Amino acid sequence: MHDGGCCDRESGGGAAHLPLEAARRRAAGIAAPIGRIETVPPGDAAGRVLAAPAHASLAQPGFDRSAMDGYALRSADLTGAGPWRLPVALRAAAGDAPAALPKRAAARIFTGAPLPAGADAVVMQEGTRREGAVVELSAAPRSGDNVRRRAEEFEAGDPLIPAGRRLSARDLALAASGGVRSLSVRARVRVALLVTGNELAIAGAAPDPGSIPDVDTPLLPPQRVPDRLEDHLRAIGEAARGADLVITTGGVSVGEEDHVRAAVLGLGGRIEVEGVAMKPGKPTALGRIGDAVWLGAPGNPMSACIAFCLFVPSLLAGLSGDAGAPPPRFGVAANALRKQAGRAEIRPARLKGAGAAGAPRLVIDAHVSSDRLGPLARAQCCVILPAGAEEIAPGAPVEILPFPEGM
């Protein structure tokens, strides 16, 4: 990916360009979950995708326990009219193993403590009056009041977490409460990034005459590939053998120095998306090389960034088996816009408060240039303007395209 210059290749070479939504569906279809499975302890599973359902090995709660600080008793012991006075025969705190409760007696009990055998209810301490070793209460509890019964949340063997979930701290806490000792997760997706272009100068270095800065290196550590077909065949072939997702930037048009498509086909790969009816990023291509998925992003920086935002998160989700893709988010335009009908446009946007229904109001850039990074750096997200629209009125709904974390 480079910063402007002669290679603003948005033509796509006359390839059959899919509508954006069709291309996104095609991308989701080619990214099947990788088959490598690992077994890890819950402490090492944060952010991983569960490959098989997790089941509890313990009941939760594991015993009848108090939900309140108060006094445990037999509800049947309270006969006649109140108030009632009971001797306090036991004390039970969390972690104790209290003895059985004598008849017509109460146990001082604290939240989380096991319920003494024989007790079936807990009276909150606010509803009692203590005099030495005797407690007095004026309202009789019902059996089960303020008691968390054994296995009321789940029993040993019950399913806890479904396959396909990307594991959060909440999931891991649930697994711990169910006594889960190991989890079956998908292996991490291996990604290779290849940057093409003889004109690229290493970021931060003084460019030679005719060269332009490589702006990919600050984003991801790429492998740089010279503009020769034999170098493309070697580099892309090696990447496909060692990665699940191969991302190339540049070289996907039809110029004499654009060799990526020829290399993909020369390696026995197939191109599933020849181009996308969108601006910027029309030459974006998708396919497979052996077992690896391939995303061919254009070389211009904004085009490459848009291609990444549109396709890489869903490709990674598909390859990792993540079944929890978030639904689309929508905001409303804060300003009027015009565009040409025929292809979707993706434009940088900045947040400006919220609309009447609480949807984000977005100030959307009026123009887009595929070789400029400044608008992206100033933006808080992008928006997708539909292909058929020519005018976007203030207040019109627009789909939000978020920047992936860290971008």
Image: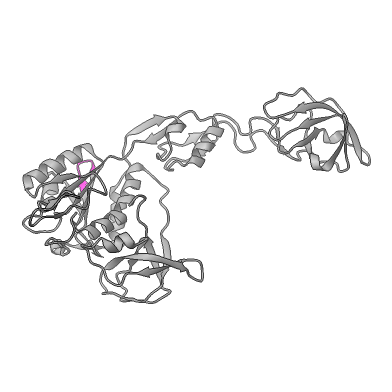
Looking at the picture, tell me which residue is in the foreground, 123 or 302. Answer: 302
In the displayed structure image, the side of residue 90 where residue 152 appears, left or right: left
Q: Residue 327's x, y, as percent?
A: 42, 56
Compared with residue 289, is residue 132 higher up or lower down, i.e. above or below?
above
In the displayed structure image, the side of residue 195 where residue 323 appears, left or right: right
Image point (35%, 65%), residue name = 349
Q: Tell me, what colour scheme is on the image?
A: one colour
- Seen as rendered, the residue at the extreme right is 81
Residue 219 visible in the displayed image: yes
If the image is split into quadrants, where does the N terminus sit?
Answer: bottom left
**Principal SS element in the magenta part?**
strand
- Seen as rendered, the residue at the extreme front is 206
In the displayed structure image, the side of residue 58 where residue 40 appears, left or right: left
Q: Residue 328's x, y, as percent?
A: 41, 59
Residue 136 found in image quarter: top right
Compared with residue 49, is residue 107 higher up or lower down, i.e. above or below?
above
Image point (80%, 34%), residue name = 71
Residue 141 found in image quarter: top right
Q: Which residues are magenta?
A: 288-292
Counting every numbered tag in the picture gives 0
* Residue 216, magenta (yes or no): no
In the displayed structure image, the side of residue 25 where residue 7 appears, left or right: left
Q: Residue 150's x, y, as percent?
A: 66, 33
Q: Residue 345's x, y, as percent?
A: 28, 67
Residue 261 visible in the displayed image: no
Image point (51%, 71%), residue name = 356
